[in-house]
Every structure is written in structure tokens, then in C-alpha cells.
Image (spheres, rainbow, N blue to C red):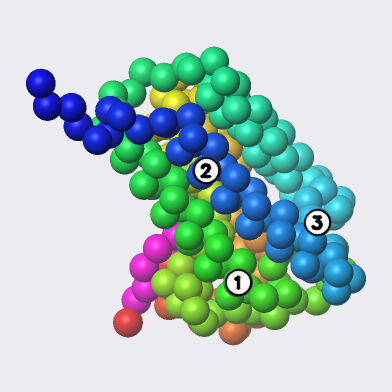
Amino acid sequence: MHILIEEKLSYTTLALMVLAIFYGIYFTKMLLQKRKGIRTHQIGRRKERELHRVETLMSIATFGIVVVQLGSIALGWNRMPANGRFTGFCIGILGDAIFLISVVCMKDSWRAGIPDQDKTKLVTDGIYQFSRNPAFLGFDLMYIGMFLLYCNVLTGIYTLFAMTMLHLQILQEEKFMGQTFGEDYLAYKKRVFRYLGRRN
């Protein structure tokens, strides 16, 4: 009987690898910026009602999904065949790579949340030539990959919740970018798509 390589893999190890790489990038960037006196985590600092509500719900979603993902791994909750799980691993690693490239390209302008006082630069080069929100694209691909690795109803619900809240956060950030960078951002917005692609 022929056994596919996908059926021999340790999906626990692969899923933990996807998560460790992703959050390793996140916290390493945060620590590097902290050494320069930059506060990376800005979520919930601004008091505008709608923005505060979106950022609070996004925090609940993005922290809650980690608990659900780790719980699914620990309990082995999965309804996906091996080839689908391997596809999930590949999508998750792609998300990690896109996230890494995006935070490197942003340099010290990268923030989690909309800053209340910090001045940042409008970054339009590197990966930002092809996506206005590559870090969020990285998050989404990682979430989709993890859902395929440990496919169950709870992970599915939290994946949709987290991706929806990230999208609402993007909409808030677009308003902020338009107000902060004016015509430069509006021209960039016309040229580059929200998630992936550009007009030439």
C-alpha cells in the first residue's frame, strides 16, 4: 500500500512551527522597537468611540484565536484529511513570510493599532508596492492555514471573527492614513489594492 508523505507528517509540529514563526516575528519586532523607545502596541490608545470598539474587538479576536488554535492542537480537533492539512501548513508559512517581509519593509513605522501621537512615514515601496496591507494579509493567510491544519467548528468561527475584525481595523486605518498623509495616500490608494495587486 502506497502511503503519501502528507500522511506521515507531524501536524502538531507543523502547526506549532507556523505559530512560533509568526509570533516570533511579531514579538521580536516589538522588542527591537522598544529598545529604540518606540511603542509598537498602540491598540486601544485612541479614544474615538468607533475606533476604540473595533480595536477592542480585534484584540479579543486576535488573542482568543491563539487560545482556540492551541486548544485545537492540544486536543487534536481536526476534520481535515492529510493533504488539506499540508496545504494549510504551506498557506500558514506563506502568511509568515509575507508578515516578515511587511514588518521589515515598514522599518520603524510599523505599529499594531492606530498611533495616538507617534509620527510615522507612509511606506509605499517593497512589498507595499503590491499590497496596502501586507501584514494583515499575512495574518489572514496564517489564520486560514491554521484552520486547515486543525479544522473544526470553533477554529472556523474564530478564524472568521478574527479576519472580520482585522478587515474592520483596516477600514479604520485607511481613514487615519487619508487624514494623516492626504493626497500622497489617496494616490497610493488608487494605485495599490487593499490586499493584493496594483493598477498600472
Report which quarter residue 81 is drawn in.
top left
Q: Is residue 102 visible in the rendered structure shown here? A: yes
Other residues around mark 2 within 10 Å, as few (<14) / some (14–19) / many (≥20): some
Looking at this view, name the residue that lies furthest to the left.
1
Question: Disc 1 designates what residue?
Answer: 104
From the viewer's perspective, tell me whether residue 30 is left or right of residue 173: right
Question: Disc 2 designates what residue?
Answer: 17
Residue at the spot 31% in from the left edge and 40% down from the top edge: 87
- Whether residue 178 appears in magenta in the rendering, the answer is no
Other residues around mark 1 within 10 Å, as few (<14) / some (14–19) / many (≥20): some
Amino acid under label 3? Gln
Residue stretch rendered in magenta on the structure = 194-199
Q: In what quadrant of the picture does the N terminus appear?
A: top left
Other residues around mark 3 within 10 Å, as few (<14) / some (14–19) / many (≥20): some
Question: Disc 3 designates what residue?
Answer: 42
In the structure shown, which secondary structural element does the residue marked by tag 3 occupy?
Answer: loop
Amino acid under label 1? Val
From the viewer's perspective, tell me whether residue 72 is left or right of residue 42: left
Amino acid under label 2? Met
Residue at the spot 51% in from the left edge and 44% down from the top edge: 18
In the rendering, at what x and y percent does residue 16 appear? Answer: 54, 37
In the rendering, at what x and y percent does residue 111 appear? Answer: 72, 63
Q: Which label's residue is closer to the chain start, 2 or 1?
A: 2
Residue at the spot 45% in from the left edge and 38% down from the top edge: 14
From the viewer's perspective, tell me whether residue 64 is left or right of residue 143: right
Q: Which label's residue is closer to the chain start, 2 or 3?
A: 2
Q: In what quadrant of the picture does the C terminus appear?
A: bottom left
Disc 2/disc 1 C-alpha distance (Å): 20 Å
- C-beta proximity under 8 Å, tags 1 and 3: no
Q: Is residue 115 visible in the rendered structure shown here? A: no
